[in-house]
Image (cartoon, rainbow, N blue to C red):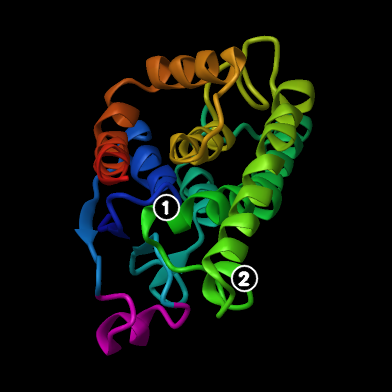
Amino acid sequence: MSLKLNMLPPSVNNLPIRVFVRAAGLSFEEQNVWGTTKLEEYTAKCPSQLTPSIETGELPRGLLWESCAVMMYLANRDGLTGLYPTDPASRAMIDSANFYGVGSLYPAVARATYPRAGFGGAPGEVSASNASDEEKESGRRAAEESIPRLLEVYRDFFLTDAGFIGNDEPTIADIRFASTLEFVPLTDIELPGWVTDYLQRVESALGDAYSEPVADVRGFIAQVKSKA
C-alpha cells in the first residue's frame, strides 16, 4: 500500500506524522517539500498549502492533511489500537488532548517561537502586522507567558498513572504533545521537571521512531540559537 508523506524537516507541526509512521512500522516515502507548498503542483492536490500531508490512492481526494486527522485515519485503517485505543473513554481523553493541543497549546507555542525561528505568523497576528518591533516582541512574550499554565493541564488532567495520555503506552496524543514541546526551547521558558521527564519517557518508549526525526528539529533549534 503506497503512502507518501509530504513534510518539512524542522517543523514540530510535521513531526507527529514523521514519528507516527515509524512507530507504526508503516511503509512510506518521505518527501521534503520545503519551499514548494505554494507552487501550483502542490496546491493542485493540497489546496490548503499545508503540511504535513499524506498521499494514498485509497483516500477520496488522494490526499489528507492535519497531523491529528492523519494519525487518526492511519491508526483506524490499520487497527493500531496501541497508538489509538478503541475504548471510548481512553479515546475521548486522547481526542480531547489533541484538540486542546491544536486549539490552545500549539497556537501559543507558535506565537512565542515562530518569530525567533524565522517563520511567518498567521494573518492578523501581531508578528505578521506592521506593528513595531517592540510591539511584536510584547506579543511574543505574552504568548510565551501563557505556555506554563497550558502545560499544567496535561499533567493535571490528561496523563494516566503510567505517564502517558489515555493509555499505559504512548498514543497519538503523546506523539502530538511531545512534538509540540520540542519547540519550547526557542522560548525563555525553563521546562519543569515533570515535562522533561515526560519527554524522556516518550522518547524512550518510542525509540528510534522518535529519535530519528526529532534530530532534524533539534538540529534546527540549535542552529537558530547559535545565531541569536
Q: Secondary structure at mark 2?
A: loop
Bin the neighbour count of mark 1 within 10 Å (Cα to Cα): few under 14, some 14-19, many 20 and up: some
Q: Is residue 43 above or below residue 57?
A: below
The percent position of residue 107, horizontal first and vertical second, equals 62, 55
| Amino acid type assigned to the residue bearing label 1 in the image | Arg
| Front-most of residues 82 and 172 | 172
Q: Which mark is residue 136?
A: none
N-term mark: 1 or 2? 1
The percent position of residue 120, horizontal first and vertical second, equals 44, 68
| Amino acid type assigned to the residue bearing label 2 in the image | Glu
| Front-most of residues 68 and 35 | 35
Mark 1 — residue? Answer: 116
The percent position of residue 20, horizontal first and vertical second, equals 40, 39
Query: Looking at the image, which residue is at 33% across and 66% down?
Result: 55
Query: Looking at the image, which residue is at 28% across and 85% down?
Result: 39
Q: Is residue 17 above or below residue 174?
A: below
Bin the neighbour count of mark 2 within 10 Å (Cα to Cα): few under 14, some 14-19, many 20 and up: few
Q: Is residue 45 magenta?
A: yes
Stretch of the chain drawn in magenta: 36-48
Q: Is residue 6 above or below residue 117?
A: below
